[in-house]
Amino acid sequence: MDRRSDSVNRWARIRTFAGLAGIAFAVTLALVIGNRLSDEALAVLAGAACGVGAAIPTSLLIVAITQRPHKQSSADHPHAYPPVVVIAPPGSGQQTDAWNHVPPSMIPPMERNFSVVGGAETDTESPGYTN
């Protein structure tokens, strides 16, 4: 029993030391980066940190609401409408003997005439696509 408590105490001390070392490293890194960055860059980082800080409680609230069991009965809502079921009569779907025409987006464009403004003047304009 005594050996087991010593082992648990050692791991607790190691975890505490690792946590303190990680915090010291993060603070030192933040100070070094903070001294080297411009004011604009620090403002962007501060805004990003505030945005993340504001998003965390909102996200937790959304998760808590969506994970809550959703129990509602018709007795809770006296004005609730009953479910509506629509059954289509036979033969109201697509007719197999109907002609399938090409959709409007697949029709090739009409031939167009273009004229260049400010270019050399010509007496004849050629139909079709020109530069």
Image (tube, rainbow, N blue to C red):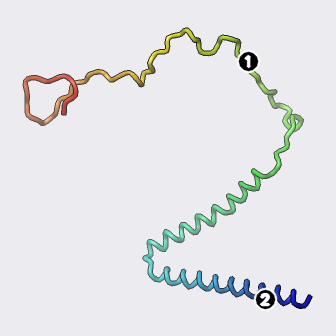
Assign the C terminus to one quadrant of the image: top left
User: Which label's residue is closer to the chain start, 1 or 2?
Assistant: 2
Q: Left or right: 59 with respect to 113?
A: right
Judging from the image, what secondary structure is the residue with disc 2 in?
helix
What's the amino acid at mark 1?
Ile
In the rendered image, residue 24, in percent from the top left (x then y), is placed at 62, 86
**Front position in the image: 10 or 22:** 10
Residue on which the image places disc 2: 10
What's the amino acid at mark 2?
Arg
The alpha-carbon separation of the residues under discs 1 and 2 comes to 72 Å
Q: Residues within 10 Å of mark 2 (few under 14, many from 20)?
A: few
**Front position in the image: 119 or 76:** 119
Q: Residues within 10 Å of mark 1 (few under 14, many from 20)?
A: few
- Mark 1 vs mark 2, foreground winner is 2
In the rendered image, residue 99, in percent from the top left (x then y), is placed at 50, 11
Q: Is residue 117 above or below residue 38?
A: above
In the rendered image, residue 103, in percent from the top left (x then y), is placed at 45, 21
Quadrant of residue 1 within the rendered picture:
bottom right
Quadrant of residue 77 within the rendered picture:
top right
- Image point (26%, 22%), residue name: 111
Q: Is residue 117 above or below residue 126?
A: below
- Image point (73%, 20%), residue name: 86
Q: Left or right: 65 with respect to 44?
A: right
Q: Tag on residue 87? A: 1
Judging from the image, what secondary structure is the residue with disc 1 in?
loop
**Looking at the image, which residue sits at the far right?**
1
